[in-house]
Amino acid sequence: MKTKKIVSYAFLALVLLFVYAPILVLIIFSFTDAHIIGQWHGFSFDLYVRLFTVERLRNMIVNTVVLAALAGAISTVLGTLGAMGIFYAKKGWSKSLQGASNINVINAEIVIAVSLALVFSMLAFNRTYYSLLIGHVAFCTPFVVLSVIPKLKQMDPSLYEAALDLGATPAKALFKVVLPEILPGIVSGFMLALTLSLDDYIITSFTKPAEFDTISTYVYNAVKNTAKSELPAFRALAAVIFAVIAAVVVVLNIRANRKTNKKIIENKEIKR
Amino acid sequence: MEEMTKETPLAPAENDCIIELVDLTRVFEDDGMVAVDNVNLKVKKGQFVTFLGPSGCGKTTTLRMIAGFDKPTSGKILLNGKDISALPPHKRPVNTVFQRYALFPHLNVYDNVAFGLKLKKVKVTYETENGRQFTKVEKLSKADIAEKVNRALKIVDLEGFERRSVSTLSGGQQQRVAIARAIVNEPEILLLDEPLGALDLKMRKDMQLELKEMHKKLGITFIYVTHDQEEALTMSDTIGVMKDGEIQQEGTPLDIYNEPVNAFVADFIGESNIFSGTMTGKRKVRFLNKTFDCVDDFEKNEKVDVVVRPEDVVFADEGQGQVDGTIVSSIFKGVHYEMVCKIGKTEVVAQDTLERKVGEKVSVVIRPEDIHIMAKEFTVNKYEGYITKHNTVAFGDGEFACDLTQLYENSFLDEEGYLITAEGEKLDLTDTDVEVEVGLKDIELVDVDTPEREGGAAGNIVSIIYKGDHYQVIVRTDENEEDYVCDTEYTWNENDRVSVVIPRDAIRLRLKEEVKR
Ligand SMILES: Nc1ncnc2c1ncn2[C@@H]1O[C@H](COP(=O)(O)OP(=O)(O)OP(=O)(O)O)[C@@H](O)[C@H]1O
Ligand SMILES: [Mg+2]
């Protein structure tokens, strides 16, 4: 019995090690300034300092985050409106519209990227920050639609009518009743768009202006020609990103736990 | 001239009529379903009106049109004499209690109830120092809202629940919040769509009383929807009984109970015996193989439905009453016994405080004023017939080709004309008695002089009634005076001699009793 438990724990540890070992190595070596990973030149915060002082690095990080925030925000608005349009369209239309929107979710990214690039060159549109932003929005919007529609479907359809019944104009009913109801879907759509945009490489490289870089395009180029490389600094960046994500996940978990506990307590009170 | 038309006064009788449905019809485009069919109804101010009908009869659809969520396909909705069909829901002085409450889950009880008030704008008149008056349109103050919400919550008995999330409330409490949310806006009309449907029996009875009480106190017009006849009878001032989108009967609960206009209403409202009868003379009707005196006057020979309520059936000792029978069952129901008396093949249900034992021979007495006679609704032609040796069916003074395999599931006919059942049994159906049904639309009439289309029976047209978009024609045969009622778009004349053609597959057969094997 006991050995069985030990074996199962050992196995679990092995799996976790397999998944997290590369990241752990990366984090450890982010605290030394050796150029080649594996060498230890003594403990230092140098890489972290460089991350925020070397202008090119700093720009690129800011670029990526701002781009993701903008693309996420715009595609959330468009996607939410689109989802409502699809949901409230006539039955036949609704199905085909949703299908059309889903194609882009399943479609290979490279196809979207190439077609976007084609469209921009056809319109004699130079590759600018705007073409990049449009590319990201076009890519992310269907995902937002996809995460909002289920919430609309779950919503009791009489809620909207109840709001109208109580004197709300259609616009007011939308903002006061429908939006709060589907908010969880909108938020998760936004998060999805944000992460998709943050680590996108293919679409970015097809639509970005030459002198502009996001983290992914920069890393890719840096790997290709190591000469001018600020590569070691990315170990620090990776560690930071990992820390942020881990923190977010932990916070979300704690909050979710608290909520269910609260529900249970409330229910108990009612029973009493 | 313009002036004249504008000032046409309303007829005084219509002034106290708060809402009026005129030829209201709703057809759903996608499936062609006529959910509401030419409904006409007048509702007086302050009344409690109920739409009563089985599931799917169009009650909710009617209510949704009054509330403004659904647009009528045709017809009008008049509110205080003005057509509001085109008015959007938020501009109608009508509030709804939804079938499944539709409370806003993200708001607590207080905010749910205050929802309508927060949107409300009122005209307030101010006076300046130099005595000039001016009016401003403004929102209700927080204090006003709080006062109204608290009053509404008090009416529904939910004080102290203000901060509770609606998802933590019981069904009955959610129900009350939904009612409070509607009445707090002081609507002219309150629409309630089966508001008690989700509650258990006891809670329902309590809420029925409370709603009735509320109606009295508030003086608002209630339009209520239910499929529960008891609920409708106890609560309403007026009931509209609906079926298939049409109002069958409108009247006070007492009227509808005592004077149902047709078998459907009689059956839907309370327990009743419904017999098929024929008028045999002035105020004389024949049913249960016996002629009874009655108080309703119908055309002689007209086929009618006869309704007798169980409490109006009285038993006398054998031979002392109008028609004799045997008690076949007796159940004690708390206050009275419910007994079934068999007369010939027909069962008569009776309620009495005096028990008659099972097997006892009794005689039934029904007073003329307790016999309620209704015009029969023709929905299908019914005949008694038999199978001929040619595997056709003879009925109604005629003989028709038919599909015998419908009598036994998965059966088929062999070459010799025997019916082989699914179990492989070989049956000779010759002379088997069957019940035959033929739809009104399935009968085709052709001129007798059309030799290429010979029908299974022939007769003369005795009646033609125009029914809006078609004629209902009755053909009567010579020999036994059997009637074929058919719906047709073609025009015929009375006394035309016609041949009756029925497609083979339109003849529905049912065995009268299991065939002897
Ligand atoms: N949006 C719609 N599209 C098509 N058909 C509909 C629609 N809404 C209702 N119907 C049909 O119209 C008919 C009447 O529906 P309605 O909801 O008014 O019935 P109801 O009397 O309220 O029944 P219940 O007692 O079950 O609530 C039904 O046959 C229903 O299937
Ligand atoms: Mg309904």
Image (cartoon, grey):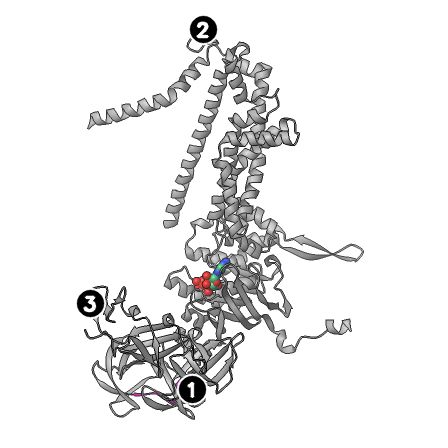
**Which sits earlier in the primary sequence, circle 1 or circle 3?**
1
- Amino acid under label 1? Glu
Most extreme residue toward the right, as rendered? B130
Magenta span: B363-372
Residue drawn at (62%, 59%), measured in percent from left and top?
A: B91
* Residue B72 point in image, percent of width and height: 57, 64
- Amino acid under label 3? Glu
* Residue B511 point in image, percent of width and height: 28, 74
Q: Are marks 3 and 2 on the same chain?
A: no
* Residue B499 point in image, percent of width and height: 42, 81
Q: From what the image shows, is residue B467 above or below residue B410?
A: below
Q: Quadrant of the N terminus of chain A?
A: top left
Cα distance between the residues tagged 1 and 3: 44 Å
Residue drawn at (54%, 28%), measured in percent from left and top?
A: A203
Give the label on residue A41, or none: 2
- Please name the residue that numbered disc 1 is placed on: B302
